[in-house]
RNA sequence: GCGCCUGUAGUGAAGGGGUUAUCACAAGAGGUUUCCAACCUCUUGUCCCGGGUUCAAAUCCCGGCGGGCGCACCA
């Protein structure tokens, strides 16, 4: 059985059993858009719920939810408008594509600001040659709009906006409320799950590169002078993982190392980043990703996103090779500072209390209004503010004071009083730094399915078991009446409604075909427990429970089974 | 976006100008009374879309859309 075909079998199973489909198929389909079907949507919801639970159970992380439609100004400040609206020129000789502004680097002060026609004329007038093949035969430059534009409001009065390319900006917008929610104390974080949009040039590889995708992001706000994380890391004997560090960095190469060692040796440069690497690993393993198929790769300086000062990818190995599924970035103060500058707000900061108040004493010149007023009359206000804005104390009095309009006035000793101000400074304002783990939920779901998909042909050759972790299975239980009559059908229906009544538990009832076929159907979509109602059930109120992964079967009283389902510990029955 | 390959029931495949498009599995109804994809009978359902060539197109040609791979791109 050639390994290359496993991908095809997995993909067709996913369609056949209602996990993932191409979207809008009866109209020809759209590349990069997928539907989750009845089975897949439950798996997806459970992955997202597990993710939210994983982070919020930490205690200082809360969930928020922001709009996907985002005004242009927000994305200008974040840098997405500039970064995402690049023009591309294509070499008609060798078909290579290049960023147009990079081609004319040095020929213009700010190539990034130019429009398509200006770029084209500069490229042709300077006879730019292709960096790859040397020819000078260029296509017209085309804008690469990686964001989906839209308009808020009707007609020409509408406001320019985009579908968000990441959920992160919504959390930066909420920083002031989060800061208040957490009683003005760092560190704290916010998570958000939802859709993100990127108009990919060529979506590929099924659900790996989508144009509308499910993302889950965490923004963790910290004091850069007191970054947390070191104490949360596992001890030295902690999990060993593969880490590929920055090839241009201080410790290039491929390491097999614990998170704590990686931090202590400087491979991971930041304690909070190290802590999130570990917690990311823990989450992935918790929902059923194979720990041996996870590795972390540090971005080289040259491939870093425009906002990140340090970045690690978490890559997972599957049928498509190693795929980046999580990005963990130290975004520093970039976003908050930029939003502060663009919006003019001063709410994007935090207060750092000094351990002991710092005594400060300084001399100030205090303007004497009763003298200045009568002398300068209508210019008095200007003079008073100029005095209080003086950076130092003049060496002698009287002195010449420069006003805003450039004129000078003489200030005499009667007009000012030299005061010595004593005071305590208790702290200072600063812009928090942000550590961001960003998860591609669809890619993670793909790899959960990939790693769970097991073909171990018992007697028949292609017997499929989806060994999903119970946290992410589409149904918790399958109820199977051995025969669909003689009262077993009735008993199964009543058991079904009892189990359906349990909050958060998904059940299905399957009474068609042979019992073996029904086990096989349940195994294929990863239902962990199959409950069979048989003849004995009618007389003694017991049912059999079958373990998906080893076919082991036990007989238990129905009430006992229901209480174990309620407590989510069916496995303890075995 | 370029190049090569490609598109037939839910899934996987056969058919490559000429009656009513074939098969397996799946699905539905009934039978069988069964604990690991059993069997029997019956049933439903398919040529990606649009043009063109032709007496006749699922088949050949062109375009679009979708898919695979390579190049490029990839917060």
Image: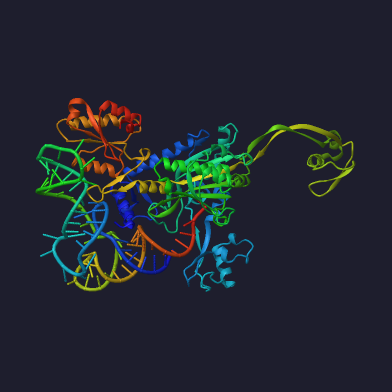
Image height of A463 relative to B63, above or below: above
Quarter of the image that includes the N terminus of chain A: bottom left
Looking at the picture, the colour scheme in use is rainbow
Give the residue displayed 56% in from the left and 57% down from the top.
A302
Does A298 sit left or right of B47 as displayed? right
Q: In which quarter of the image is residue A221?
A: top right
Nearer to us in this view, A63 or B19:
A63
Q: In this view, does A223 lie to the left or right of A487?
A: right
- Side (left or right) of A351 relative to A488: right
Is A29 on the left or on the right of B35, as rendered?
Answer: right
Query: Can I make out residue A164 in this image?
Result: no
Residue A396 placement (x, y as % from top left): 90, 42
Q: Nearer the viewer, residue A316 or A214?
A: A316
Q: Quadrant of residue A178?
A: top right
Expressed as whole percent of the image width and height from the top left, the position of residue A488 reads 18, 31
Image coords of residue A12 (percent x, y): 30, 52
* Residue found at the far front of this picture: A237
> Is A302 situated above or below A224?
below
Specify whether residue A195 is in view: yes
């Amino acid at each position: 059985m050639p390994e290359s075909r496993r991908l095809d079998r997995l993909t067709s199973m996913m369609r056949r059993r209602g996990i993932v489909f191409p979207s809008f198929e009866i109209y020809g389909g759209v590349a990069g858009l997928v539907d989750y079907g009845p089975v897949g949507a439950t798996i997806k919801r459970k992955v997202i719920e597990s993710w939210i639970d994983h982070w919020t159970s930490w205690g200082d992380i809360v969930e928020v939810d922001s709009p996907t439609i985002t005004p242009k100004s927000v994305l200008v400040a974040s840098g997405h408008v500039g970064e995402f609206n690049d023009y591309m020129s294509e070499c008609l000789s060798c078909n290579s594509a290049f960023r147009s502004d990079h081609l004319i680097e040095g020929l213009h002060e700010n190539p990034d600001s130019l429009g398509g026609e200006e770029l084209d004329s500069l490229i042709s007038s300077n006879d730019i040659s292709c960096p790859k093949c040397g020819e000078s035969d260029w296509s017209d430059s085309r804008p690469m709009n990686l964001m989906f534009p839209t308009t808020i409001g009707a007609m020409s009065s509408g406001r320019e906006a985009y579908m968000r390319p990441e959920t992160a900006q919504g959390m930066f917008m909420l920083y002031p409320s989060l800061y208040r929610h957490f009683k003005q104390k760092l560190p704290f974080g916010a998570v958000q799950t939802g859709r993100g949009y990127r108009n990919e040039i060529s979506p590929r590889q099924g659900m790996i590169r989508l144009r509308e995708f499910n993302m889950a992001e965490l923004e963790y706000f910290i004091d850069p002078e007191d970054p947390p994380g070191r104490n949360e890391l596992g001890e030295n004997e902690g999990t060993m993982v593969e880490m590929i560090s920055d090839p241009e960095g201080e410790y290039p190469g491929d390491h097999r190392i614990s998170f704590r060692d990686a931090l202590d040796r400087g491979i991971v440069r930041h304690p909070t980043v190290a802590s999130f690497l570990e917690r990311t690993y823990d989450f992935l393993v918790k929902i059923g990703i194979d720990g041996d198929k996870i590795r972390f790769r540090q971005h080289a300086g040259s491939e870093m996103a425009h906002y990140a000062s340090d970045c690690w990818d978490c890559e997972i190995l599957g049928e498509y090779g190693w795929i980046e599924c999580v990005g963990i970035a130290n975004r520093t103060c970039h976003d908050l500072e930029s939003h502060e500058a663009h919006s003019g707000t001063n709410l994007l900061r935090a207060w750092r209390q000094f351990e002991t108040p710092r005594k400060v004493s300084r001399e100030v010149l205090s303007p004497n209004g009763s003298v200045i007023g009568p002398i300068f009359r209508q210019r008095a206000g200007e003079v008073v503010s100029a005095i209080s804005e003086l950076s130092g104390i003049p060496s002698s009095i009287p002195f010449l004071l420069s006003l805003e309009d450039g004129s000078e006035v003489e200030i005499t000793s009667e007009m000012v009083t030299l005061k010595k101000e004593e005071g305590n400074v208790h702290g200072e304002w600063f812009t928090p730094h942000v550590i961001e783990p960003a998860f591609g939920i669809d890619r993670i779901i793909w790899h959960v399915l990939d790693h769970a998909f097991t073909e171990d042909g018992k007697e028949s050759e292609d017997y499929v078991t989806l060994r999903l972790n119970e946290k992410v299975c589409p149904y918790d239980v399958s109820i199977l009446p051995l025969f669909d009559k003689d009262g077993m059908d009735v008993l199964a229906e009543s058991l079904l409604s009892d189990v359906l009544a349990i909050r958060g538990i998904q059940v299905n009832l399957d009474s068609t075909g042979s019992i073996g076929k029904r086990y096989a159907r349940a195994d294929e979509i990863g239902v962990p427990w199959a409950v069979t109602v048989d003849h004995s059930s009618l007389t003694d109120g017991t049912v059999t429970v079958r373990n998906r992964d080893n076919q082991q079967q036990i007989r238990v009283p129905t009430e006992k089974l229901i209480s174990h389902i309620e407590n989510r510990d069916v496995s303890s029955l075995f």
